[in-house]
Image: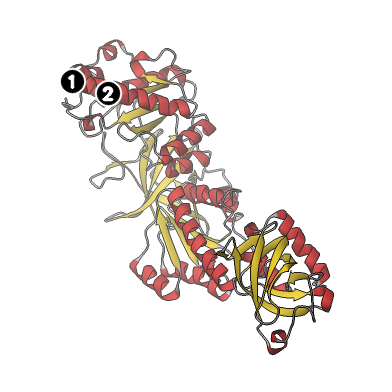
Amino acid sequence: MPMDDIKKRTEHMEEAKSQKFNVPGLLVIDTPGHESFTNLRSRGSGLCDIAILVIDIMHGLEQQTIESINLLKMRKTPFIVALNKIDRMYGWKAIPNAPFRESLASQGRDQQEEFKSRMKAAITNLAEQGLNASLYYENPDIRKYISVVPTSAITGEGVPDMLLLLVQLTQQMLAQRLMYCSALQCTLLEVKAIEGLGTTVDVVLVNGTLREGDTIVACTLNGAVVTQIRALLTPHPMKELRVKGSYQHHKFLKAAQGVKIAAHGLEQAVAGTQVYVVGPDDDIEEIKDECVQDMDTILSAVDRSGEGVCVQASTLGSLEALLEFLRSDDVKIPVSGINIGPVHKKDVMRASVMHERKKPEYAVILCFDVGVSKEAQQMANDMDVKIFTADIIYHLFDQFTAYMAQVRERKRAEASPYAVFPCILKILPQFVFNKKDPIVLGVDIAEGIAKVGTPICIPSQNFITLGKIASMEMNHKDVDIARKGDSVAMKIQSTTAAESARLYGRHFDHKDELVSHISRHSIDLLKENYRNDLTKDEWLLVVKLKKVFDIQ
Protein backbone atom coordinates (compact mmCIF):
# COMPACT_ATOMS: atom_id res chain seq x y z
CA MET A 1 0.00 0.00 0.00
CA PRO A 2 1.89 3.09 -1.18
CA MET A 3 1.60 6.16 1.06
CA ASP A 4 -0.34 8.12 -1.59
CA ASP A 5 -3.15 5.57 -1.41
CA ILE A 6 -3.14 5.62 2.41
CA LYS A 7 -3.41 9.43 2.35
CA LYS A 8 -6.31 9.17 -0.06
CA ARG A 9 -8.16 6.65 2.16
CA THR A 10 -7.68 8.78 5.28
CA GLU A 11 -8.31 12.25 3.79
CA HIS A 12 -11.75 12.62 5.45
CA MET A 13 -10.32 12.19 8.95
CA GLU A 14 -9.54 15.29 11.00
CA GLU A 15 -6.38 13.76 12.56
CA ALA A 16 -4.98 12.92 9.12
CA LYS A 17 -4.86 16.59 8.12
CA SER A 18 -2.19 17.37 10.73
CA GLN A 19 -0.42 13.98 10.48
CA LYS A 20 3.09 13.82 9.04
CA PHE A 21 3.57 10.66 6.95
CA ASN A 22 7.20 9.47 7.12
CA VAL A 23 6.85 5.77 6.29
CA PRO A 24 6.82 5.04 2.54
CA GLY A 25 3.79 2.73 2.83
CA LEU A 26 2.54 -0.50 4.37
CA LEU A 27 3.17 -4.09 3.33
CA VAL A 28 0.39 -6.31 4.68
CA ILE A 29 0.81 -10.08 4.95
CA ASP A 30 -2.53 -11.82 5.33
CA THR A 31 -2.15 -15.04 7.31
CA PRO A 32 -5.10 -17.41 7.62
CA GLY A 33 -5.73 -17.71 11.36
CA HIS A 34 -2.71 -18.35 13.51
CA GLU A 35 -0.83 -21.14 11.80
CA SER A 36 1.07 -19.19 9.13
CA PHE A 37 1.72 -16.49 11.68
CA THR A 38 3.59 -19.13 13.68
CA ASN A 39 5.40 -19.90 10.48
CA LEU A 40 6.50 -16.33 9.86
CA ARG A 41 7.34 -15.52 13.45
CA SER A 42 8.81 -18.77 14.71
CA ARG A 43 11.25 -18.88 11.82
CA GLY A 44 12.85 -15.90 13.60
CA SER A 45 12.52 -14.00 10.36
CA GLY A 46 11.16 -10.94 12.13
CA LEU A 47 8.90 -10.36 9.16
CA CYS A 48 6.23 -8.72 11.20
CA ASP A 49 6.81 -5.28 12.74
CA ILE A 50 3.25 -4.84 13.96
CA ALA A 51 0.26 -7.19 13.78
CA ILE A 52 -3.50 -6.73 13.34
CA LEU A 53 -5.50 -9.23 15.38
CA VAL A 54 -8.97 -9.62 13.86
CA ILE A 55 -11.81 -10.39 16.30
CA ASP A 56 -15.39 -11.01 15.19
CA ILE A 57 -17.59 -8.57 17.16
CA MET A 58 -20.49 -11.02 16.90
CA HIS A 59 -18.62 -14.10 18.22
CA GLY A 60 -15.84 -12.75 20.43
CA LEU A 61 -12.62 -14.71 20.97
CA GLU A 62 -12.32 -17.99 19.06
CA GLN A 63 -9.81 -20.74 19.91
CA GLN A 64 -7.37 -19.64 17.20
CA THR A 65 -7.67 -15.99 18.32
CA ILE A 66 -6.48 -17.01 21.80
CA GLU A 67 -3.68 -19.01 20.17
CA SER A 68 -2.68 -15.91 18.18
CA ILE A 69 -2.75 -13.73 21.32
CA ASN A 70 -0.42 -16.19 23.08
CA LEU A 71 1.95 -16.11 20.10
CA LEU A 72 1.94 -12.31 20.04
CA LYS A 73 2.69 -12.20 23.77
CA MET A 74 5.43 -14.80 23.42
CA ARG A 75 7.10 -12.91 20.57
CA LYS A 76 6.48 -9.52 22.24
CA THR A 77 5.02 -8.28 18.94
CA PRO A 78 3.11 -4.98 19.15
CA PHE A 79 -0.42 -5.30 17.77
CA ILE A 80 -3.78 -3.61 17.39
CA VAL A 81 -7.21 -5.25 17.38
CA ALA A 82 -9.61 -4.92 14.44
CA LEU A 83 -13.07 -5.55 15.90
CA ASN A 84 -14.60 -6.69 12.63
CA LYS A 85 -18.13 -7.18 11.20
CA ILE A 86 -19.75 -4.10 12.78
CA ASP A 87 -22.10 -4.06 9.77
CA ARG A 88 -23.63 -7.34 11.05
CA MET A 89 -25.19 -5.60 14.04
CA TYR A 90 -28.96 -5.41 13.77
CA GLY A 91 -30.19 -2.33 11.92
CA TRP A 92 -26.68 -0.96 11.17
CA LYS A 93 -26.76 1.60 8.34
CA ALA A 94 -23.51 1.30 6.45
CA ILE A 95 -21.57 4.29 5.12
CA PRO A 96 -18.98 2.77 2.76
CA ASN A 97 -15.32 3.54 3.61
CA ALA A 98 -16.30 6.07 6.29
CA PRO A 99 -14.17 6.73 9.40
CA PHE A 100 -15.69 4.79 12.31
CA ARG A 101 -16.73 7.73 14.51
CA GLU A 102 -18.60 9.34 11.63
CA SER A 103 -20.36 6.03 10.94
CA LEU A 104 -21.27 5.44 14.61
CA ALA A 105 -22.66 8.98 15.00
CA SER A 106 -25.08 8.40 12.11
CA GLN A 107 -26.56 5.21 13.67
CA GLY A 108 -29.76 5.05 15.72
CA ARG A 109 -29.77 4.83 19.53
CA ASP A 110 -30.34 1.04 19.53
CA GLN A 111 -27.35 0.39 17.28
CA GLN A 112 -25.13 2.64 19.41
CA GLU A 113 -26.22 0.80 22.57
CA GLU A 114 -25.62 -2.60 20.97
CA PHE A 115 -22.15 -1.48 19.86
CA LYS A 116 -21.34 -0.30 23.41
CA SER A 117 -22.36 -3.64 24.96
CA ARG A 118 -20.48 -5.71 22.35
CA MET A 119 -17.41 -3.49 22.69
CA LYS A 120 -17.54 -3.94 26.47
CA ALA A 121 -17.77 -7.74 26.03
CA ALA A 122 -14.74 -7.73 23.69
CA ILE A 123 -12.68 -5.67 26.18
CA THR A 124 -13.70 -8.10 28.97
CA ASN A 125 -12.66 -11.08 26.80
CA LEU A 126 -9.26 -9.49 26.18
CA ALA A 127 -8.91 -8.73 29.92
CA GLU A 128 -9.46 -12.46 30.60
CA GLN A 129 -6.39 -13.06 28.43
CA GLY A 130 -4.40 -10.60 30.54
CA LEU A 131 -4.61 -7.67 28.10
CA ASN A 132 -5.71 -4.10 28.79
CA ALA A 133 -7.64 -2.79 25.79
CA SER A 134 -9.44 0.39 24.87
CA LEU A 135 -11.21 2.00 21.90
CA TYR A 136 -8.35 3.49 19.95
CA TYR A 137 -9.56 7.12 20.26
CA GLU A 138 -10.06 6.72 24.04
CA ASN A 139 -6.72 4.99 24.66
CA PRO A 140 -5.08 6.56 27.76
CA ASP A 141 -1.62 5.08 27.05
CA ILE A 142 -0.73 3.34 23.76
CA ARG A 143 2.16 1.48 25.45
CA LYS A 144 -0.02 -0.10 28.15
CA TYR A 145 -3.38 -0.48 26.38
CA ILE A 146 -4.12 -2.34 23.14
CA SER A 147 -5.94 -0.09 20.67
CA VAL A 148 -9.22 -1.54 19.37
CA VAL A 149 -10.48 -0.31 15.98
CA PRO A 150 -14.07 -1.28 15.04
CA THR A 151 -14.16 -2.15 11.32
CA SER A 152 -16.17 -3.77 8.59
CA ALA A 153 -14.19 -5.56 5.89
CA ILE A 154 -17.26 -5.55 3.61
CA THR A 155 -18.31 -1.88 3.83
CA GLY A 156 -14.82 -0.50 4.54
CA GLU A 157 -16.02 1.38 7.64
CA GLY A 158 -13.24 1.89 10.18
CA VAL A 159 -10.52 0.98 7.64
CA PRO A 160 -9.27 4.63 7.36
CA ASP A 161 -8.98 4.70 11.18
CA MET A 162 -6.95 1.49 11.13
CA LEU A 163 -4.56 2.66 8.41
CA LEU A 164 -3.94 5.97 10.17
CA LEU A 165 -3.42 4.23 13.52
CA LEU A 166 -0.89 1.82 11.96
CA VAL A 167 1.07 4.74 10.50
CA GLN A 168 0.97 6.64 13.81
CA LEU A 169 2.06 3.66 15.91
CA THR A 170 4.86 2.57 13.60
CA GLN A 171 6.25 6.11 13.40
CA GLN A 172 6.00 6.70 17.13
CA MET A 173 7.07 3.35 18.54
CA LEU A 174 8.99 1.46 15.87
CA ALA A 175 11.14 4.14 14.26
CA GLN A 176 14.39 2.27 15.10
CA ARG A 177 13.12 -1.12 13.92
CA LEU A 178 11.95 0.29 10.62
CA MET A 179 15.38 1.59 9.62
CA TYR A 180 16.45 0.16 6.25
CA CYS A 181 19.43 -2.20 6.35
CA SER A 182 21.36 -3.30 3.26
CA ALA A 183 21.98 -6.91 4.45
CA LEU A 184 19.54 -9.16 2.57
CA GLN A 185 16.64 -10.55 4.56
CA CYS A 186 14.19 -12.39 2.33
CA THR A 187 11.65 -15.00 3.42
CA LEU A 188 9.86 -17.41 1.12
CA LEU A 189 6.08 -17.47 1.66
CA GLU A 190 4.58 -19.60 -1.09
CA VAL A 191 5.47 -21.67 -4.16
CA LYS A 192 3.13 -21.36 -7.18
CA ALA A 193 3.05 -22.37 -10.81
CA ILE A 194 1.87 -19.52 -13.09
CA GLU A 195 1.04 -19.79 -16.78
CA GLY A 196 3.74 -18.28 -18.94
CA LEU A 197 6.20 -18.00 -16.03
CA GLY A 198 6.49 -21.59 -14.76
CA THR A 199 7.20 -22.12 -11.08
CA THR A 200 7.40 -18.90 -9.11
CA VAL A 201 7.94 -18.16 -5.42
CA ASP A 202 6.32 -15.36 -3.41
CA VAL A 203 8.82 -13.80 -1.03
CA VAL A 204 8.83 -10.92 1.40
CA LEU A 205 11.89 -8.76 0.94
CA VAL A 206 12.37 -7.30 4.43
CA ASN A 207 15.83 -5.78 3.95
CA GLY A 208 18.37 -5.49 1.16
CA THR A 209 17.94 -5.58 -2.63
CA LEU A 210 17.19 -8.09 -5.40
CA ARG A 211 18.25 -7.84 -9.06
CA GLU A 212 17.19 -9.75 -12.13
CA GLY A 213 19.99 -12.25 -12.90
CA ASP A 214 21.08 -12.62 -9.22
CA THR A 215 22.18 -16.14 -8.21
CA ILE A 216 20.03 -17.25 -5.28
CA VAL A 217 20.07 -20.24 -2.90
CA ALA A 218 16.76 -21.64 -1.62
CA CYS A 219 15.99 -24.58 0.65
CA THR A 220 14.08 -27.66 -0.54
CA LEU A 221 13.16 -30.91 1.22
CA ASN A 222 16.09 -32.54 -0.60
CA GLY A 223 18.69 -29.92 0.34
CA ALA A 224 19.74 -26.51 -1.03
CA VAL A 225 19.10 -25.52 -4.65
CA VAL A 226 21.11 -22.86 -6.55
CA THR A 227 19.32 -20.97 -9.33
CA GLN A 228 19.17 -17.63 -11.13
CA ILE A 229 16.41 -15.01 -10.96
CA ARG A 230 14.73 -14.85 -14.39
CA ALA A 231 12.12 -12.26 -13.50
CA LEU A 232 11.20 -10.00 -10.56
CA LEU A 233 7.49 -9.23 -10.42
CA THR A 234 5.31 -7.20 -8.09
CA PRO A 235 1.55 -6.63 -8.06
CA HIS A 236 0.21 -3.21 -8.96
CA PRO A 237 -0.26 -0.85 -5.96
CA MET A 238 -3.20 -1.76 -3.65
CA LYS A 239 -3.42 -5.24 -5.16
CA GLU A 240 -2.63 -8.60 -3.58
CA LEU A 241 0.38 -10.66 -4.64
CA ARG A 242 -1.62 -13.92 -4.58
CA VAL A 243 -4.47 -12.67 -6.79
CA LYS A 244 -4.05 -13.52 -10.48
CA GLY A 245 -3.62 -10.63 -12.87
CA SER A 246 -0.95 -8.60 -14.58
CA TYR A 247 2.32 -7.97 -12.75
CA GLN A 248 4.85 -5.17 -12.96
CA HIS A 249 8.30 -6.35 -14.13
CA HIS A 250 11.42 -4.92 -12.44
CA LYS A 251 15.17 -5.10 -13.04
CA PHE A 252 15.93 -4.07 -9.46
CA LEU A 253 13.92 -4.01 -6.20
CA LYS A 254 14.65 -2.54 -2.79
CA ALA A 255 13.05 -3.61 0.53
CA ALA A 256 10.49 -3.79 1.93
CA GLN A 257 7.95 -5.41 -0.37
CA GLY A 258 6.21 -8.55 -1.50
CA VAL A 259 7.94 -9.93 -4.61
CA LYS A 260 7.26 -12.81 -6.96
CA ILE A 261 10.47 -14.44 -8.23
CA ALA A 262 10.47 -16.57 -11.38
CA ALA A 263 13.40 -19.01 -11.47
CA HIS A 264 14.19 -22.63 -12.44
CA GLY A 265 14.30 -25.49 -9.92
CA LEU A 266 12.12 -23.95 -7.21
CA GLU A 267 9.29 -26.53 -7.45
CA GLN A 268 10.40 -28.17 -4.19
CA ALA A 269 11.27 -24.95 -2.33
CA VAL A 270 10.05 -24.91 1.26
CA ALA A 271 7.77 -22.08 2.37
CA GLY A 272 8.96 -20.37 5.54
CA THR A 273 12.70 -20.62 4.80
CA GLN A 274 15.18 -17.86 3.95
CA VAL A 275 16.34 -17.03 0.42
CA TYR A 276 20.02 -16.11 0.07
CA VAL A 277 21.74 -14.12 -2.70
CA VAL A 278 25.27 -15.26 -3.69
CA GLY A 279 27.66 -12.30 -3.85
CA PRO A 280 30.87 -12.21 -5.96
CA ASP A 281 33.09 -13.07 -2.94
CA ASP A 282 30.74 -15.59 -1.27
CA ASP A 283 31.47 -19.29 -0.86
CA ILE A 284 28.44 -21.03 -2.37
CA GLU A 285 28.90 -24.22 -0.28
CA GLU A 286 28.86 -22.21 2.97
CA ILE A 287 25.62 -20.51 1.94
CA LYS A 288 24.07 -23.87 1.03
CA ASP A 289 24.96 -25.25 4.49
CA GLU A 290 23.44 -22.22 6.17
CA CYS A 291 20.34 -22.52 3.99
CA VAL A 292 19.51 -26.11 5.03
CA GLN A 293 20.05 -25.56 8.76
CA ASP A 294 16.34 -24.83 9.23
CA MET A 295 15.39 -28.14 7.61
CA ASP A 296 17.87 -30.10 9.73
CA THR A 297 16.28 -28.74 12.91
CA ILE A 298 12.86 -29.93 11.73
CA LEU A 299 14.07 -33.38 10.64
CA SER A 300 15.53 -33.98 14.11
CA ALA A 301 11.91 -34.13 15.39
CA VAL A 302 11.23 -37.31 13.39
CA ASP A 303 11.20 -40.54 15.41
CA ARG A 304 14.27 -42.56 14.39
CA SER A 305 12.60 -45.87 15.40
CA GLY A 306 10.35 -45.39 12.38
CA GLU A 307 7.17 -45.84 14.38
CA GLY A 308 4.65 -43.03 14.37
CA VAL A 309 2.24 -41.00 12.28
CA CYS A 310 3.11 -39.10 9.08
CA VAL A 311 2.70 -35.33 9.08
CA GLN A 312 2.16 -33.00 6.11
CA ALA A 313 1.87 -29.21 6.25
CA SER A 314 1.76 -26.31 3.83
CA THR A 315 4.87 -24.49 5.06
CA LEU A 316 7.99 -25.16 7.07
CA GLY A 317 6.69 -23.02 9.93
CA SER A 318 3.30 -24.69 10.12
CA LEU A 319 5.08 -28.07 9.99
CA GLU A 320 7.30 -26.92 12.84
CA ALA A 321 4.29 -25.65 14.81
CA LEU A 322 2.51 -28.99 14.32
CA LEU A 323 5.58 -31.06 15.29
CA GLU A 324 6.07 -28.87 18.37
CA PHE A 325 2.44 -29.47 19.28
CA LEU A 326 2.66 -33.26 18.76
CA ARG A 327 5.82 -33.36 20.90
CA SER A 328 4.29 -31.42 23.82
CA ASP A 329 3.68 -33.27 27.11
CA ASP A 330 -0.12 -33.17 26.81
CA VAL A 331 -0.08 -34.80 23.36
CA LYS A 332 3.04 -36.97 22.87
CA ILE A 333 2.31 -38.48 19.45
CA PRO A 334 5.38 -40.00 17.72
CA VAL A 335 6.13 -38.90 14.15
CA SER A 336 7.81 -41.22 11.63
CA GLY A 337 7.70 -39.09 8.48
CA ILE A 338 7.17 -35.49 7.37
CA ASN A 339 6.51 -33.70 4.12
CA ILE A 340 5.53 -30.27 2.87
CA GLY A 341 2.78 -29.76 0.32
CA PRO A 342 -0.24 -31.80 -0.84
CA VAL A 343 -0.65 -35.53 -0.10
CA HIS A 344 0.27 -37.83 -3.00
CA LYS A 345 0.30 -41.63 -3.45
CA LYS A 346 3.91 -41.93 -2.26
CA ASP A 347 2.93 -40.37 1.09
CA VAL A 348 0.15 -42.94 1.52
CA MET A 349 2.62 -45.75 0.71
CA ARG A 350 4.96 -44.49 3.42
CA ALA A 351 2.17 -44.35 6.03
CA SER A 352 0.93 -47.86 5.11
CA VAL A 353 4.26 -49.34 6.31
CA MET A 354 2.86 -49.13 9.88
CA HIS A 355 0.56 -52.06 9.08
CA GLU A 356 3.64 -54.22 8.40
CA ARG A 357 5.23 -52.99 11.63
CA LYS A 358 2.17 -54.20 13.58
CA LYS A 359 1.29 -50.61 14.52
CA PRO A 360 -1.90 -50.12 12.47
CA GLU A 361 -3.05 -47.25 14.72
CA TYR A 362 -0.15 -45.17 13.34
CA ALA A 363 -1.11 -45.79 9.68
CA VAL A 364 -2.28 -42.18 9.70
CA ILE A 365 -1.43 -38.97 7.83
CA LEU A 366 -2.11 -35.71 9.68
CA CYS A 367 -2.58 -32.99 7.05
CA PHE A 368 -2.35 -29.41 8.18
CA ASP A 369 -3.59 -26.80 5.72
CA VAL A 370 -2.85 -28.98 2.62
CA GLY A 371 -4.96 -30.76 0.00
CA VAL A 372 -5.19 -34.49 -0.73
CA SER A 373 -5.10 -35.70 -4.35
CA LYS A 374 -7.99 -37.90 -5.50
CA GLU A 375 -5.66 -40.82 -6.29
CA ALA A 376 -4.04 -40.57 -2.84
CA GLN A 377 -7.45 -40.63 -1.11
CA GLN A 378 -8.51 -43.67 -3.15
CA MET A 379 -5.27 -45.45 -2.34
CA ALA A 380 -5.62 -44.59 1.37
CA ASN A 381 -9.10 -46.14 1.39
CA ASP A 382 -7.75 -49.32 -0.26
CA MET A 383 -4.72 -49.60 2.06
CA ASP A 384 -6.60 -48.69 5.27
CA VAL A 385 -4.60 -45.50 5.85
CA LYS A 386 -6.49 -42.76 7.70
CA ILE A 387 -6.06 -39.19 6.41
CA PHE A 388 -7.07 -36.35 8.75
CA THR A 389 -7.17 -32.81 7.36
CA ALA A 390 -7.73 -29.48 9.15
CA ASP A 391 -6.56 -25.89 8.96
CA ILE A 392 -6.42 -25.42 12.74
CA ILE A 393 -3.96 -27.46 14.81
CA TYR A 394 -6.50 -28.08 17.57
CA HIS A 395 -9.07 -29.52 15.15
CA LEU A 396 -6.46 -31.91 13.78
CA PHE A 397 -5.53 -32.96 17.30
CA ASP A 398 -9.21 -33.45 18.24
CA GLN A 399 -9.77 -35.67 15.17
CA PHE A 400 -6.70 -37.76 15.90
CA THR A 401 -7.52 -38.02 19.64
CA ALA A 402 -11.04 -39.25 18.81
CA TYR A 403 -9.55 -41.80 16.38
CA MET A 404 -6.99 -43.00 18.97
CA ALA A 405 -9.78 -43.33 21.56
CA GLN A 406 -11.66 -45.61 19.11
CA VAL A 407 -8.48 -47.63 18.48
CA ARG A 408 -7.84 -47.98 22.22
CA GLU A 409 -11.45 -49.02 22.83
CA ARG A 410 -11.19 -51.65 20.09
CA LYS A 411 -7.90 -52.97 21.48
CA ARG A 412 -9.36 -53.06 24.98
CA ALA A 413 -12.36 -55.02 23.73
CA GLU A 414 -10.00 -57.50 22.04
CA ALA A 415 -7.80 -57.73 25.15
CA SER A 416 -10.69 -57.90 27.61
CA PRO A 417 -11.04 -61.73 27.75
CA TYR A 418 -7.29 -62.17 28.39
CA ALA A 419 -6.48 -59.16 30.63
CA VAL A 420 -6.68 -60.42 34.22
CA PHE A 421 -7.13 -57.77 36.92
CA PRO A 422 -5.39 -58.47 40.25
CA CYS A 423 -7.57 -59.40 43.26
CA ILE A 424 -7.44 -61.26 46.57
CA LEU A 425 -10.80 -62.49 47.93
CA LYS A 426 -11.72 -63.68 51.45
CA ILE A 427 -14.52 -66.25 51.71
CA LEU A 428 -17.39 -65.47 54.12
CA PRO A 429 -18.12 -68.96 55.62
CA GLN A 430 -21.70 -68.04 56.63
CA PHE A 431 -22.50 -67.26 52.95
CA VAL A 432 -21.58 -70.45 51.08
CA PHE A 433 -24.62 -71.08 48.85
CA ASN A 434 -23.30 -73.84 46.57
CA LYS A 435 -20.24 -75.97 47.40
CA LYS A 436 -19.70 -77.61 44.01
CA ASP A 437 -19.64 -76.40 40.39
CA PRO A 438 -20.89 -73.74 39.88
CA ILE A 439 -19.52 -72.61 43.27
CA VAL A 440 -21.63 -69.76 44.73
CA LEU A 441 -20.35 -67.97 47.82
CA GLY A 442 -20.09 -64.62 49.55
CA VAL A 443 -16.67 -62.94 49.49
CA ASP A 444 -14.98 -59.77 50.72
CA ILE A 445 -12.67 -58.06 48.19
CA ALA A 446 -9.55 -57.83 50.38
CA GLU A 447 -7.37 -56.21 47.69
CA GLY A 448 -7.59 -55.19 44.04
CA ILE A 449 -10.46 -55.43 41.54
CA ALA A 450 -12.73 -58.46 41.00
CA LYS A 451 -14.16 -58.51 37.46
CA VAL A 452 -16.56 -60.90 35.73
CA GLY A 453 -14.40 -63.26 33.61
CA THR A 454 -11.42 -63.27 36.02
CA PRO A 455 -9.84 -66.77 36.43
CA ILE A 456 -9.59 -67.75 40.14
CA CYS A 457 -7.02 -70.01 41.80
CA ILE A 458 -5.89 -70.92 45.35
CA PRO A 459 -2.13 -70.53 45.89
CA SER A 460 -2.32 -72.06 49.40
CA GLN A 461 -3.66 -75.34 47.89
CA ASN A 462 -0.92 -75.91 45.28
CA PHE A 463 -2.39 -73.26 42.95
CA ILE A 464 -5.50 -75.30 42.10
CA THR A 465 -7.82 -73.43 39.71
CA LEU A 466 -11.57 -73.11 40.30
CA GLY A 467 -12.73 -71.53 37.02
CA LYS A 468 -13.79 -67.99 36.07
CA ILE A 469 -16.04 -65.48 37.82
CA ALA A 470 -19.35 -65.91 35.95
CA SER A 471 -21.38 -63.25 37.78
CA MET A 472 -21.48 -61.09 40.93
CA GLU A 473 -24.28 -59.54 42.98
CA MET A 474 -24.06 -56.62 45.37
CA ASN A 475 -27.16 -55.47 47.27
CA HIS A 476 -29.29 -57.79 45.07
CA LYS A 477 -28.02 -56.08 41.89
CA ASP A 478 -25.79 -57.61 39.23
CA VAL A 479 -22.36 -55.92 39.00
CA ASP A 480 -19.42 -56.49 36.64
CA ILE A 481 -16.74 -54.95 38.87
CA ALA A 482 -16.16 -54.96 42.65
CA ARG A 483 -13.31 -53.09 44.33
CA LYS A 484 -11.42 -53.34 47.63
CA GLY A 485 -13.81 -53.13 50.60
CA ASP A 486 -16.88 -54.42 48.69
CA SER A 487 -18.73 -57.60 49.72
CA VAL A 488 -20.40 -59.58 46.91
CA ALA A 489 -22.11 -62.88 46.19
CA MET A 490 -19.99 -64.57 43.51
CA LYS A 491 -20.62 -67.44 41.10
CA ILE A 492 -17.49 -69.27 39.89
CA GLN A 493 -18.01 -71.43 36.78
CA SER A 494 -15.54 -74.22 35.91
CA THR A 495 -13.81 -74.17 32.49
CA THR A 496 -12.28 -77.72 32.60
CA ALA A 497 -13.33 -81.17 33.85
CA ALA A 498 -10.74 -80.98 36.69
CA GLU A 499 -12.19 -77.66 37.87
CA SER A 500 -15.76 -79.02 37.85
CA ALA A 501 -14.71 -81.66 40.46
CA ARG A 502 -13.49 -79.01 42.99
CA LEU A 503 -15.53 -79.01 46.20
CA TYR A 504 -15.76 -76.40 48.96
CA GLY A 505 -14.90 -78.09 52.28
CA ARG A 506 -12.76 -80.83 50.67
CA HIS A 507 -10.31 -79.04 48.33
CA PHE A 508 -10.45 -75.61 50.02
CA ASP A 509 -12.34 -73.73 52.73
CA HIS A 510 -12.80 -70.22 54.18
CA LYS A 511 -9.22 -70.13 55.52
CA ASP A 512 -7.88 -70.12 51.94
CA GLU A 513 -7.61 -66.89 49.95
CA LEU A 514 -8.97 -66.84 46.41
CA VAL A 515 -6.57 -65.07 44.05
CA SER A 516 -6.90 -63.95 40.40
CA HIS A 517 -4.69 -66.17 38.21
CA ILE A 518 -2.37 -63.68 36.47
CA SER A 519 0.31 -64.46 33.87
CA ARG A 520 3.07 -62.59 31.99
CA HIS A 521 0.74 -62.19 28.99
CA SER A 522 -2.16 -60.84 31.10
CA ILE A 523 0.15 -58.32 32.84
CA ASP A 524 1.41 -57.06 29.43
CA LEU A 525 -2.20 -56.61 28.25
CA LEU A 526 -3.03 -54.69 31.45
CA LYS A 527 -0.04 -52.38 30.93
CA GLU A 528 -0.88 -51.77 27.29
CA ASN A 529 -4.63 -51.28 27.54
CA TYR A 530 -5.65 -50.63 31.13
CA ARG A 531 -2.69 -48.74 32.63
CA ASN A 532 -4.83 -45.83 33.84
CA ASP A 533 -7.70 -48.03 35.07
CA LEU A 534 -5.59 -49.38 37.95
CA THR A 535 -4.63 -47.33 41.00
CA LYS A 536 -1.10 -47.30 42.42
CA ASP A 537 -2.13 -49.82 45.12
CA GLU A 538 -3.57 -52.15 42.48
CA TRP A 539 -0.31 -52.05 40.49
CA LEU A 540 1.56 -52.83 43.73
CA LEU A 541 -0.74 -55.83 44.09
CA VAL A 542 0.26 -56.96 40.58
CA VAL A 543 3.93 -56.80 41.70
CA LYS A 544 3.06 -58.81 44.85
CA LEU A 545 1.19 -61.48 42.83
CA LYS A 546 4.08 -61.71 40.36
CA LYS A 547 6.21 -63.00 43.23
CA VAL A 548 3.43 -65.41 44.32
CA PHE A 549 3.18 -66.90 40.81
CA ASP A 550 6.94 -66.55 40.20
CA ILE A 551 6.45 -64.44 37.02
CA GLN A 552 9.58 -62.88 35.58
Residue 107's tag is: 1
| Mark 2 or mark 1, earlier in chain | 1
**Label 1: few (<14), some or many (≥20) within 10 Å?**
some
Q: Position of residue 452 (x, y in %)?
A: 61, 70
Q: Which amino acid type is shown beneath numbered disc 2?
A: Phe
Residue 115's tag is: 2
* Residue drawn 40% across the image and 53% down it: 390
Q: Nearer the viewer, residue 156 or 438?
A: 438
Q: Residue furthest bottom?
A: 497
Q: Position of residue 418 (x, y in %)?
A: 63, 74
Q: Position of residue 40 (x, y in %)?
A: 46, 41
- SS class, disc 1: loop
Report whether 307 appears left or right of 551: left
Report whether 73 appears left or right of 513: left
Q: Is residue 103 visible?
A: no
Q: Nearer the viewer, residue 121 or 249?
A: 121
> Mark 2 and mark 1: span between their CA atoms?
10 Å
Quarter occupied by residue 31: top left
